Image: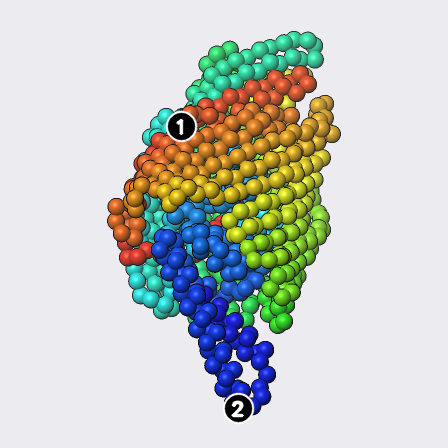
Amino acid sequence: MIIKNFCSCHDLAVLLHPETERTKIMKKWVIIDACLAMSLASYAQNNNVSSTGAATNSPSKADSLRMDSIIHSLPDVMVKGHRPIVKVKGAALTYDLPQLIKNHPVDNAYEAIKQLPGVNEQDDALTLNAQPVTVMIDGKATTMTSEQLYSLLKSIPTSRIANAEILYSAPARYQVKGQVINLQLKHNTGITALQGELFGGYTHQNRNSYTERASLLYTNKKWEFDMLYSFGHGKRSYQYDNEFAHTLADGTSYAYSTHSNNIKRHLNHNIRLGINYNIAKDHQLSFAYTSQLNNSRGTSQDEGSFNSLLRIHAKSQLHNFRLDYSTPFGLSAGAEYTYYNSPDEQWLNSSLYDEELDIASKQRINKWHAYLKQEHDLGKDWGLNYGINYTTSRDKSSQENNDNISSRNNNASTNIDNAYDGNPTQTEDQVSFYIGASKSFGQKLTMEASLMEEYYHTNIWHEWNIFPTLSITYLPKAGHILKLNLDCDRDYPSYWSVKNFTTYNAGGYGKIVGNPTLKPSRDLDLSLTYILHSRYVASLFLQNSTDPFRQLPYQSDTKKEAEYKFTNFDHVTIAGLMLTAPINIGNWWQNRLTFIEAYQNDKNSHFYDLPFNRSKWFSQATWNGTFLFGKHVILNLDAFIRTDAIQGIIDSPAAGYLNAALTWKPLKGDKLQMKAYCNDIFETADNNLHDTYKGQHVINDMHFGRIIGLSLTYRFGGYKAKQHEEVDTSRFGK
């Protein structure tokens, strides 16, 4: 605040015109008196904050007045005893994530991100305003799949988090499109120190699982060495209730009802090594290596109208190497290589068809990515950026039926290593060029726009596309922010989903097949967001996707089976409103409420003989409650509820959950943290799927069970964090 006051004094001095020497001296004294008065007022305000127990941070040099009403509204917020949690910086909303999770029992970056307004977890994936969102680390794109990225985030301790940016339409300079959460981690260069964190966790979900994690960070004047290792192992158990009614074209009817018991054993290793060399100020060379080694075995046993036993053994390994170079004059370059290999085997014995299947499959991917970008400060609040990105991948996957005595496929052992008209190797190339500009009009209006042209090439697709983005931020007055965002994007199917391969579920009744003709979707996102006093958020959003791909079941009228396949819809349109607000009662009870009301329309005019055009209104609400018992004990209650929803011909019944966590921090500086928690206390979070559309009858009721856990975290050396980007693995896996 003192810095701000001196800036105001300077502005006052500019308004005064020199006259006589005596007049100049008097004006100087007037200016000094004004500065002292404003500084004393600021000091008094700071003391008021301290008396209420609220913490304050001085704005950094990079924070300008237009970075939001965080500065303009600070006195009002300080009187209330609350710290602002969000500010505007260009096209991004920057959240003070450490402050947001301060009294929440989260111990990793993944759980911390879930505390951001509008962010939820659906089907084991993070969403923003009920739509997919890309997670980045320190503004760097990744080649990891979502599953692998989430695994990395779960291994990053919260002590490493500096803040989090939300971009409803990421500019092209971020090298990704669509909605983005950019997790920014802490730097600790310039001092010599060894810091670290140890973590141990126990989880019970019908079976026992364990996680151990260690993080070390060594820094000196020029170097940063960062190491992270986590080890997960144990079992998980869950159940399905399946109901099928199937009528063939000749009028023959079948009805099946089964209960499925599933057990999965896992053994996972995550390794992260990073080196940063600070050549000079804002001049850095960095290298990172990420490795994930997973080994899992699972069994699924069906009992009821038929009996079956399915065994799966899956292994995977990922190795990612990344090199980045940044200069103080805005030039950045980097290269990345990812290797992914995932062999697995599926063995099925079922009485439904009196068959035995032994299927071995393998996915092996080599992926390269390189970029070059330049940013310029043109003066007078103008900015210019441009760059080029190139990504290429080679997917050599295969599948072999080793021992097929199925009554459905009366052929001997067959190698079905084929896709794209018999070519076992899928080649994909993407080249994009972009240019963007930003402009600030005073302290109230900021605009940023970019235009990207992309060439997409596969064995069957050859397309040029143009993707514009626009972000407008307007500050009508202190404490009020308006943001308008427009984004055009493209979503690409996973490598495995376009392979002409087959796997089975539901005792062999379910047949999961690939779709080699699957094409990318075209996405348009439009949002208008209003932020009041850096705390209350309201957002109107419209999301339209052309050719989106979704996996749906289809009961054939010629075969006694249900086929699950990704298909392109005509469109999926979602429009709605998101509201979030903090409600605090005294200093001991903190609450945050988030509400989403949305309308969804799904249309597919070529889905077998069942074209559909379905619409649905749905609502979802989230409550995060925190109860403070002194300085060392925290109780958290989190609740979520969602009304009925649709996905194509599938109906998803209402669901919700209540989570509770008790955290004890006995040592100063949160060096030691012990947590006990129970998720889905009433076992109501199951994602059930019902398909009864026009004669179809496929019911899957899932029962995962509540989760009970204990964890212990210990930090030493004043542990702080170093940043690391993630690897994009969103398109890997089966």
Which residue, as the protein is rendered here, is positioned at the far left? Answer: 667
Query: How many residues crowd around disc 2 within 10 Å: few (fewer than 14), some, or many (20 or more)?
Result: few
Residue 598 vertical placement versus 26 (above, below) = above
Comparing labels 1 and 2, the label whose residue is closer to the camera = 2
Residues 732 and 378: in front is: 378
Vertical placement of residue 415 versus 487, above or below: above
Of 23 and 319, nearer the camera is 23
Query: Which residue of the protein is positioned furthest toward the right in this rendering?
Result: 605
When asked about the image quadrant of residue 512, the answer is top right
Q: Are marks 1 and 2 in contact (CB under 8 Å)?
A: no
Which quadrant of the structure image shows residue 618? top right
Q: Where is residue 541 shown, x and y percent of the image?
A: 64, 43
Residue to which mark 2 is pinned: 21
Q: Is residue 253 left or right of residue 188?
A: right
Q: Residue at x 44, y 56 (%)?
A: 78
What is the quadrant of the N terminus in the image?
bottom left
Residue 317 in the image, given as x and y percentages of width and height: 44, 43
Residue drawn where x is 48% and y is 58% of the image: 74
What secondary structure is marked by label 1? loop
Q: Residue at x 53, y 47 (%)?
A: 536
| Mark 1, residue position | 681
Q: Position of residue 693 (x, y in %)?
A: 66, 20
Taking depth in this image into account, of 98 and 711 the one nearest to the observer is 98
Q: Whole-Å distance between the Cαs marked 1 and 2?
A: 78 Å
Question: In this image, 297 relative to 88: left or right?
Answer: left
Question: Sequence order check: which comes first, mark 1 or mark 2?
Answer: 2
What kind of residue is marked 1? Ile
Query: From the viewer's perspective, is 272 left or right of 532?
Result: left
- At x 26%, y 46%, the residue is 666
The type of residue carrying mark 2 is Glu
Residue found at the far top of this picture: 252
